[in-house]
Amino acid sequence: MDKVFRYIDDHAEEFVERLRNLLHQPSVAAQSLGMEPCAQKVRAMLEGIGAKTQLLPTDGFPVVYGELSGQGAKTLSFYNHYDVQPAEPFELWQSDPWAAEIRDGKLYARGASDNKGDLTARICALEAYQKVMGALPLNLKFIIEGEEEIGSPSLGKFAEQNRKLIQADACVWEFGGKDLADRPTISLGLKGICYVELRVKSTIADAHSSIAAIVPNAAWRLTWALSTLKDKNEKVLIKGFYGKVRTPHKKEVDALRSLGFDEAGNKKKYGIKHFVKKLKGTALLRKLYYEPTCTICGISSGYSGTGPKTVLPAEAMAKIDFRLVPDQSPAETVKLLKAHLKKHGFDDLEVIPLNGEHPARTPIDEPLAQIVAKTAQQIYEKKPVVQPTSPASGPMYMLCQKFGIPAVSTGIGYAHSNGHAPNENIRVNDFIAGIKHIAMVVHEYGQRA
């Protein structure tokens, strides 16, 4: 592999410019901004390394699909997405979010870390491997969607309709990076998510607050309903919510002890004195990785501008997400929530499901997981942190585990990449190292094929 690594080093500037070119193209699914041109750019990048490509339609934005044939019998797939988060608020960026400026060894742009950097690194890795080694040691597939940042609403149907195209022996998932201690992190799964909006309307219009003694207040109505969902000890109070939560087995609990979670560093990062319930050690990590959540993401009602306005709100709204673990499901969570609200006298609240994804988990002893970890240690010269799952969510289940495909996440980000935030960035050296890592994963996995 030394010759492959030398090729990558010799073409490092070219690979960085290739990424910058992709980052120049806005592709915000939430705003329908630049999606078609970006999909075409990604397709051209795949064709540039010899892939047979298709632009496959969905109910939303198209999936860019690519195939590369190799000598081995096995097939490895890559899942990525070409859509990015909105760049707003623009005024908090130190440079134009689409300019892809390089400052102090870091490349700043919306999508640099999430997810165009990882996508480009994988394409560059395969170019380098083919240029130096010739034929690939196995077959490869790219499944690159355009709706991940809006909850992948079309991916489930796409996967069902294209089972043969997406089938693979294993999948390298879209994200990853280094933690606060600069150790590479690898994740073997994702929590699911059930995202809902609660709405209540108490009067036909906002009214003078002087009549609050006799007229219902939508803001209070919503507040009282929310207070029934979770207690001060962080326990979700919805009947049946924990009924199907799978208890982690011994290997999964033991894996938490090897994570080396930086409690002090993370408290500093978030500006907090302690974690919820003052948890620490294994109990803290067990809650983070293996327990579901109920989170109020936002509340809106009445007047919140400058100065006083004595108003009685007519309407109130809250957005809530539930992070789910095996074997919970989004549909059942909505059903339980509605039953809970009705039981507590809040059946007048409208429950609007906005997004739902099943939890996904890959076994710790999966061969691809072992290869990704071993090669990460060789590339980064640090023992990687192997997370049994990620606290975050994504469409992994609907594309992989549902069809018996194990998936492993690894990527080029780092602890301060600012994903989903202003000044998103990656370190250029991490990008180059990530190219080498993927080339080595392909080589090693191919030897097992």
Image: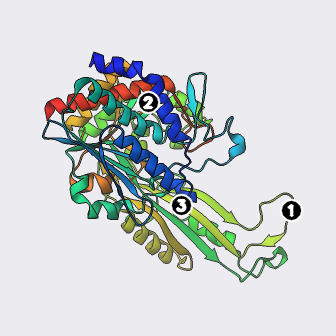
283 vs 32, nearest the viewer: 32
379 vs 346, nearest the viewer: 379
Q: CA distance from mark 1 to mark 2?
A: 45 Å
First in residue order: circle 2 vs circle 3:
2
Q: Residues within 10 Å of mark 1 (few under 14, many from 20)?
A: few
**Residue at x 29%, y 16% (from the top left corner):** 2
Instruction: Determine the image quadrant of residue 257.
Output: top left
In the rendered structure, which amino acid carries the disc numbered 3?
Ile
First in residue order: circle 1 vs circle 3:
1
Q: Is residue 322 above or below residue 112?
A: below
37 vs 62, nearest the viewer: 37
Q: Is residue 158 visible?
A: yes
Q: CA distance from mark 1 to mark 3?
A: 28 Å
Q: Position of residue 24 (x, y in %)?
A: 56, 41
Q: Left or right: where does residue 432 sit relative to residue 25?
A: left
First in residue order: circle 1 vs circle 2:
2
Q: Position of residue 449 (x, y in %)?
A: 14, 35
Q: Is residue 287 visible?
A: no
Residue tagged 2: 261
Disc ID at residue 400: none
Q: CA distance from mark 2 to mark 3?
A: 27 Å
Question: Is disc 1 placed on a helix, strand or loop?
Answer: loop
Residue tagged 1: 308
Instruction: Determine the image quadrant of residue 318.
Output: bottom right
Residue tagged 3: 320
In the rendered structure, which amino acid carries the disc numbered 1?
Pro
Q: Is residue 344 above or below residue 148?
A: below
Question: Is disc 3 placed on a helix, strand or loop?
Answer: strand
Q: Left or right: where does residue 314 sit relative to residue 258?
A: right
Is disc 2 in contact with disc 3, using a CB cutoff of under 8 Å? no
